[in-house]
Image (spheres, helix red, strand yellow):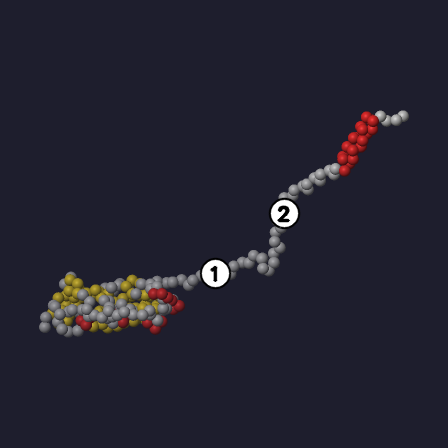
Amino acid sequence: MGLGRSNLAWLAALSAAGAVTACTPKPAEPPAQQAPVVAAPTPTKDTAPSTPPPTEEPAAVTTPNLECALSAPAKARVGEPVEVLFRLTNRSAQAVYILPWQSPLEGLMGPAFDITRDGEEVSYQGPMVKRRAPSESSYVTIAPGATAENRVEVTQAYDFQKPGTYRIAFRNELMDVTSRKEDVPRPGGDYKAAPVKCAPVDVVVTAR
């Protein structure tokens, strides 16, 4: 039994559709996403945590215990020298290193004293010294229990030409004091002033 033309056309279309279906590949499904895994680094000699070395505590700085004393003649005549004895005693248990600048320990190189006559200020008239930075040799060492002293003739720098009662007082401060030898001299002028108290002395100056 022969196929009509219409049946042949239908079979041809059906065959063509089956061929397209068979040749078209199925799209591949994307792989499932996974969370990233971060691996911990294996400790090595270079990456292993190290314990920092312990820091050294600085040595304690002890405030020096310094005892100051002034002495002078009770009376003098106009034109006579007036000598003042300045004494500094170390009452600490360790040595003390003192920069004597601007103190009677170096003489009168600046206004180390405050002096009045019957309550009125007597101005300083002595030298004013400009200096370079101090060296280790600039400091005075006072051992425990020892005393450093110096005599100063104050009429060379202050006017004692009028009769009256002259009160002589130290300015009650040392420019730089330390109990640590490694701090001598201070770098960059970083001085540590230390207060000291001296009782003032009175000198009665009479006419000739």
- Image point 44% across, 61% down: which residue? 57
For mark 1, does the 10 Å Cα neighbourhood hold few (<14), some (14 to 19), or many (20 or more) residues?
A: few
The answer for how far apart the CA atoms under marks 2 and 1 are is 40 Å
Does residue 33 appear to the left or right of 107 in the view shown? right
| Quarter containing the N terminus | top right
Image location of residue 189, percent across then percent down: 34, 65
Q: Can residue 72 be seen in this view?
A: no
How many numbered marks are there? 2
For mark 2, does the 10 Å Cα neighbourhood hold few (<14), some (14 to 19), or many (20 or more) residues?
A: few
Image location of residue 85, percent across then percent down: 23, 71
Image location of residue 8, percent across then percent down: 83, 28
- The residue tagged 2 is 37
Image location of residue 75, percent across then percent down: 15, 70
User: Which amino acid type is shown beneath numbered disc 1?
Assistant: Thr
User: Which amino acid type is shown beneath numbered disc 2?
Assistant: Val
Q: Say if 170 sits above or below 5 in the image.
A: below
> Residue 159 versus residue 62: which sits nearer the camera?
159
> Residue 98 versus residue 76: which sits nearer the camera?
98
Quick one: SS at disc 1? loop
Quick one: SS at disc 2? loop
